[in-house]
Image (tube, coloured by chain):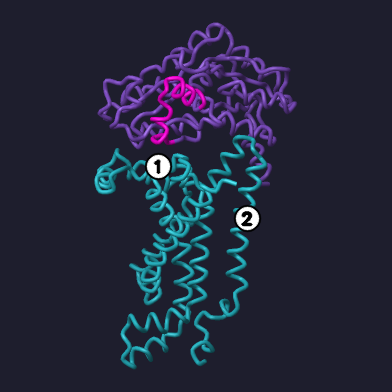
Amino acid sequence: MLYIGLVCAGSPAWGQKELRVAAAADLQPVMPVLSQAYQQATGVKLVVSFGSSSTLATQILGGAPMDIFLGADFTYPEKVVAAGLADGSAPTVYAKGTLVLWTRNDSGLLPLSVERLTDPRVKTVAIANELHAPYGRAAAAALRKMKMYDEVSPHLVVGENITQTAQFVESGNAQLGLISLTAASTDHFKEIGTYVLVPTSQYPAILQYAVVMQKSDRKAEAHAFLDWLLSSPVQGTLPKLGLGAVK
Amino acid sequence: MDFGALWLTLRLAVGTTAILLVVALPLAWWIASGRGAGRALVQAVVALPLVLPPTVLGFYLLIALGPLSAPGRLLIKIVGHPLAFSFAGLLVGSVIYSLPFAVQPLVAGFSAVDRGYVEASEGLGVSPWGTFWSVVLPLARGSLLTSTVLTFTHTVGEFGVVLMLGGNIPGATQTLSIALYDQVQEFNYAAANRTALVLVVFAIVALLTIYLLPGVSKADGKRVDVVQ
């Protein structure tokens, strides 16, 4: 009985369609907006699970029931393709991520600039894990390219994904944070803090790729969502949400 | 094998166990030596980490004791840095998180000690402190061992609190359980396997210590130990 109850609770009511989306952590502020728009446009509800791209890829390789995976880079969606779990032979690029340096307005580090990273008053700098979070990899690459890595590395505190990294610096526990523009563009972050863009010449572009799951029983719906995401009106709204358009 | 993480985990577990023994012995003795609403309340608070998700603790330590709150700012002034991202912060988190594992076996052990011995000892003019050391503690030594081993292993196995407030800093806050998580994320299953094996061995050795040591299981408050 309990099982039946759970199954019913988990299934869409009155033919309302659901799509299970595994979304990279940088999309956490973005997905609620996109979900709402998509549901209004099509009636399909997005059920979103967030995590670092690597966490999600690990879960998908372990059999997590997902219809579509929106990664924050190429590597992890490609792993899903390589494992034969993707519908299609290559991941599809859907957006471009932007790395910013963010601090709270009360941190005493204003005016903010990238040079603040080596300010002697700065004891903690939050970045995402460079080994398994795409924004972390970009942040570490930028620090190396700007020849600041050796100086900054003793002060680095590492978030498991980009949202946790943003939370470390939002809560004031870290003084500076290299976070995603998607987080920095939210009303809350704009209200309490300030960001500057990390020059895009200093890190490899964060191109975000998606794959539709081969085992999904809603492949058509998943492709339809991806097409919608790539359509020019939707791509046109991405910059407002902190993502770059790719079409 | 990540020896830095192993060494850090051991330091954290030893530090937590040492602090908790000092805290738990008097606390458990006080709880065990009477009844009443006050003691029930203290016991309930002590047991909280058993039922609360570690994320509650991580949240409080990160936000309530961070620079956004008044107590947090005071603490930062005293310690010199926020508790988050430091070994001291992990130690505080672990002490709270493992508190019930230290206190509860001791309460059970002390409660099983026959009050007659305590009264006899005090009647013979031994101080309460002396009675505790030379009568109560030897009678409850099985519980003391259980408490020590459980605290140690529970700290070794801690994950949620460390993930939330650690900042994953090698040598400072990256414990074995976090290193294992990272290795799985990196698809480095060979390394993950080695780390997981170390954690499993830790746990088995610890549990065997509790279940195998001679006399431990029957030591709690049994007459035979005192008569000898």
**Residue at (68% x, 33% y) in the render:** A61
Left or right: where does residue A178 sit relative to residue A222?
Answer: left
Label drawn at residue B191: none
SS class of the residue under badge 1?
A: loop
x, y percent for residue A245: 52, 10
Q: Which residue is mark 1?
A: B85
Chain containing mark 1: B
Examine the structure image and report whether residue A198 is included in the region drawn in magenta: no
Chain containing mark 2: B
Give the residue type that dot 2 points to. Val
Give the residue type that dot 1 points to. Phe
**Residue at (66% x, 18% y) in the render:** A91
Residue A115 occupies quadrant: top left
**In the rendered view, would you say B66 is above or below A141?**
below
Measure the C-alpha gap from mark 1 to mark 2: 26 Å
Examine the structure image and report whether residue A152 is included in the region drawn in magenta: yes
**In the rendered view, would you say A120 is above or below B55?**
above
**In the rendered view, would you say B206 is above or below A206?**
below
The answer to whether the residues at label 1 and label 2 have Cβ atoms under 8 Å apart is no
Residue A70 occupies quadrant: top right
SS class of the residue under badge 2?
A: helix
The tint chain A carries is: purple
State the extent of the magenta-drawn residues as a range. Answer: A137-157
Judged by its main secondary structure, the magenta piece is helix
- What crowding class fits label 1: few (fewer than 14 Cα within 10 Å), some (14-19), or many (20 or more)? many
Same chain for mark 1 and mark 2? The answer is yes
Q: Reading the chain from its start, which is encountered first: label 1 or label 2? A: 1
Q: Which chain is cyan?
A: B
x, y percent for residue B128: 32, 82
Left or right: where does residue B193 sit relative to residue A195?
Answer: right
Label drawn at residue B200: 2
Asked whether residue A50 is in view, the answer is: no
